[in-house]
Image (cartoon, helix red, strand yellow):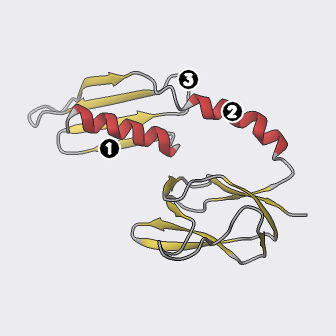
Amino acid sequence: MDIKEIQNLIKFVAKSGASEVKLEMDDIKITIRTGSDSDTTIVHQVPAAQLQPQPVISAAPVTEAPAPAAAAAPAASEDSKYITIKSPIIGTFYRKPAPDKPLFVEVGQTIGEGDVLCVIEAMKLFNEIESEVSGKIVKILVDDSSPVEFDQPLFLVDPS
């Protein structure tokens, strides 16, 4: 694994919102932690003859990660009257069932309990995410084809 691949992995993890990712391959161990003031990346290369890993790279903190967290605090207070629909699984978020099909829901659309809001692909399986509440879609919090984490907010719904 070369430095460019490691840098791309760091960028991907920072954008995904994951707090920690560990990757172990034959001769390399990578741990990437984000979401705190001291974001770190640790890379270990383990020679076949040695048992103890040796640090090779310690990357600088990703500056993009703390900024959205700070901006989310004021938004949470004004969105407190809305119900947040969260991801039940880790996977890739899609707003439509197929590239040539219409979107499941739009902002401003009224939804009912049991309506399909999106699909999340996990391990080549497409899981339909259904609404557990009735109301009006106020905001879609995730971009189409983006990776999502367990319990990550996906939609804001006004129940009134």
Find residue 37 and name its label.
3
Identified by mark 1, the residue type is: Leu
Residue at 84% over, 47% down: 80
Residue drawn at x 76%, y 68% is 109
In this rendered view, identify the residue nearer to me: 34 or 51: 34
In the image, what residue occupies the spot 55% across and 23% down? Answer: 37
Type of the residue with mark 2: Ala
Residue at numbered disc 1: 23
Q: Quadrant of the C terminus?
A: bottom right
In the picture, which quadrant includes the N terminus?
A: top left
For the residue labelled by badge 2, is the local secondary structure a helix, a strand or a loop?
helix
Q: Secondary structure at mark 1?
A: strand
Q: Position of residue 35 (x, y in %)?
A: 55, 33
Vertical side of 144 occupied by 99: above or below: below
Q: CA distance from mark 3 to mark 1?
A: 22 Å
The front one of 57 and 142 is 142
> Disc 2 or disc 3, which is closer to the eye?
2
Mark earlier in primary sequence (3, 1): 1
Q: Which amino acid type corresponds to the residue marked 3 in the rendered image?
A: Asp
For disc 2, the marked residue is 71
* Image coordinates for residue 38, horizontal then vertical, percent: 50, 22
